[in-house]
Structure formats: C-alpha cells, structure tokens
Amino acid sequence: MGAKDWMLFYASDDVSKVLRSSPKIDREATTALVERLYQGHDIRPIADGSLYLGNPPEGEVYAGVFPGLSIVCTWEAANDAPTDLSPRFVREAAGRTLYLHAMHSVVDFFAYAIWSPDGSVRRSFSLSPDSGVIEDIGTPLPFEEKYLAGDPEFIETLDEDDDYPFRFHPLDLAEAALRALFGFNYEGMWEDDDPALEEIVLSGFAVTPS
C-alpha cells in the first residue's frame, strides 16, 4: 500500500459518471477557481498534472473544472480532522456537494468528509494507528460497514499478539471510499469502466502567500 492523496470534489452531478465521460478541462474556469480560493496569494501556472497523482506538495495546487464537477488537489485538505478544512473551501461549494478524501500510506492515515449542498457536514471520519479515531461525525455510509464491524480478511493477517489498534486497515477503507464515492481506486481492483485517471488533466499552480 503506497497511495496518498488530498483532494476536494465539488459535485453537482454524479462524480463517477463525470469521470467516466473523459471530461475536458475548462482552463479559464479553473484559473478563476484557484484565484477565488487563494486570494492574497501569488499564483503562478506550473506543469499540468492529472487525477492519477492527487497529492501535490505544500505550495502547489492541481485543479480542474469540468461539467458538473470541480476538483482541487491541495495539501490543505490533509488535516487530521476533515472539518478543520478552511471555511473558504466549504463556501466555494455554493449549493453543490463537497467531498474530501485524504490518505497517507506512510502513517496509515485516512480521512473523508461530505458536506451537503446547504453547507452542513453530513459525514466526517478520520483515523490513524498513532492517533486512533480523530473525528467521527454523522452516520457511517454503507461502504464503511464491513470495516467498522471488523474486516475478516484483514483480521486473518494479524498474529495473536498483534496490537494493531483497528480490526481493519485504514487504507483498505480509504480505497473503499474512493470506489463508493468516485468510482475508481488508486490501488486494488480495476473495473472495465473505470476512468483513465492519467487522462483527466488538472492544471498546476504554485501558490505562495503575497
């Protein structure tokens, strides 16, 4: 398990449907989006990225505006508690559903959250072995049930004296969230109609406080 990401999806349509349609980026709208989110910053275009790498370093942002969907990959989405996300990112949703997904394989960290179109938090959950469950707001979604109840496949891999704090692996839950919410995985099973992540172009920007 080596995947990591920190991503925001602003959706007025089904995310997986939009991604499977091989959407073309609206570069003018994308630049305007980044300028709204990073007011008071110097913003400089850099090389394009893609959804295949949703983990830009601090000081860089990859974003794309598509029909029915906007994507922002930013280190600022990688807070331990998803609801610590800066309010400016939530305001940008403006009547759309906002999804946050973040994971880091080095520390087995996973976080996700969903804000409803009215701006309220529908679900937020984050955890890591070192910190335990960091945030748990709202009702678990169906894809979580197998893991929160104890993943039999993962439990079988544990030794009797293994003191791993969870009965499931956070990154397995992270991949299940990707599949359920967005219709793809970074690691794990590939399905025939999965979107080609390398072909979903995101504009790159360097952002530094003015």
Image (cartoon, grey):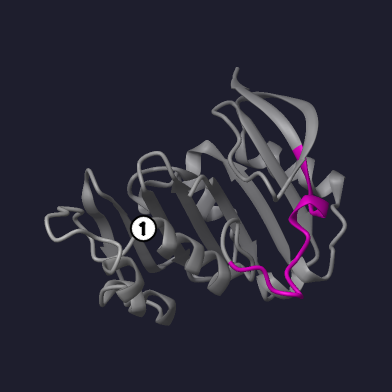
Question: As drawn, is 26 to the left or to the right of 38?
Answer: right
Question: As drawn, is 107 to the left or to the right of 23?
Answer: left
Which of 150/47 is in front? 150
Q: Quick check: 125 above or below 8?
A: below
Q: What is the three-letter code of the residue carrying label 1?
A: Pro
Q: Mark 1 points at which residue?
A: 170
Q: Quick check: 193 above or below 3?
A: below
Whether residue 192 appears in magenta in the rendering, the answer is yes
Other-residue count near label 1 (Cα within 10 Å), few / some / many at <14 / 14–19 / ≥20: many
Residue 130 place in picture, x, y as percent = 22, 43
**Which picture quadrant has residue 40?**
top right
- The span picked out in magenta is 189-203
Residue 56 place in picture, x, y as percent = 61, 35
Residue furthest to the bottom: 142
Which of 90/101 is in front? 101
Residue furthest to the top: 210
Whether residue 8 appears in magenta in the rendering, the answer is no
